[in-house]
Amino acid sequence: MPLLTEHSIKGLKVSADFSPDSHVTLYHGDRLELLEQIRRSGDKAELIVTSPPYNVGKEYESPLSLEEYIDLQRLTIEASLRVLSPTGSICWQVGHYIEGSAKAKEAYPLDLVLYPVFKEFELRLRNRIVWHFGHGLHESHRLSGRHETILWFTRATEDYTFNLDPVRVPQKYPGKRAFSGPNKGQPSGNPTGKNPSDVWDMPNVKSNHVEKTDHPCQFPVALVERLVLALTNERQLVVDPYLGVGTTAVAAILHGRRSAGADTESDYLEIARDRIVQAASGTLPTRPMNKPIYSPKDGNKLASIPEEWMDLPGD
């Protein structure tokens, strides 16, 4: 089915251009054009969440100097704020821009690079969330990178949407009891779970991940689910200026939110559409948001030391 039409997917109204009446917008084009459509409509986003290009030479990127990259991000951030509700949040998920090769490599942490840009617009940083994952590319001349970050900003106000209860995680020690005070001897934790904190341990989407598609830098649905549940309410609008294969749209649909996103790659939007069909019908494979990280059991062959390594000299 062509993307550039309005149609229905399992009862969801999906459009190619933004309409407040649509459940999902898949815009094939520049993110600034979509954001301008939303602005003109008068609708407001309660959450803008995205993982922009890192300027590392992927097929969907144009090589830029770091200064040019920052200027383009500033344009996106400014346009995003024009459609952000007064109580809304903006979440920027980024990694590192790496310059050079081998021992000449230098890492630029994009969250630190972009932080001053957000502050230009008088936003307030609520959390710098660290997303930790256990596997990725291996390095030889520096430590292998195993984390990225999410900058969560709101406007400079005390009135912003934050729902902790939907994102609570299981208590580590649910049987812990108060040691003293009026509640001495009573359970001291919250029966519905604890705050997930600002460090999130979730596998990244690599070849054996249940959510893997053709996109080289896909983030997991669970990462966005937690933000959607905590920072929006049902039927509110979630916008992703760099939609890719639609992970943000999927997370929004799964929890009764509206979604709009843009991408310049039609192949990615086709994948996004297919994932939305599956999400709407309950058949999309996803990794559960609070599923524990897998630890190999004793006797697992992959976790056992190879015989060839047994007699190697120590350091």
Image (cartoon, rainbow, N blue to C red):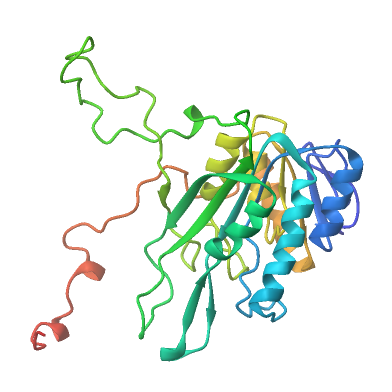
For the image shown, how many numbered marks are present on the structure?
Answer: 0
Residue 15 vs residue 149, the one in the foreground = 149
Left or right: 270, with 216 as reference point: right
Q: Is residue 298 visible?
A: yes
Which residue is drawn at the image coordinates 59% and 29% (left, top)? 158
Residue 162 found in image quarter: top right
Q: Is residue 207 above or below residue 3?
A: below
Q: Is residue 18 visible?
A: no
Horizontal and vertical percent for residue 63? Answer: 69, 81
Q: Is residue 38 above or below residue 183?
A: below
Horizontal and vertical percent for residue 307? Answer: 14, 81
Which residue is drawn at the image coordinates 17% and 14% (left, top)? 185
Q: Is residue 229 above or below residue 153?
A: above
The quadrant in which the N terminus is found is bottom right
Left or right: 312, with 115 as reference point: left
Horizontal and vertical percent for residue 55? Answer: 63, 75
Q: Residue furthest top?
A: 182
The quadrant in which the C terminus is found is bottom left
Residue 53 found in image quarter: bottom right
Which residue is drawn at the image coordinates 60% and 78% (left, top)? 56
Residue 169 found in image quarter: top left
Which residue is drawn at the image coordinates 57% and 65% (left, top)? 113
Left or right: 130, with 177 as reference point: right
Horizontal and vertical percent for residue 252? Answer: 66, 41
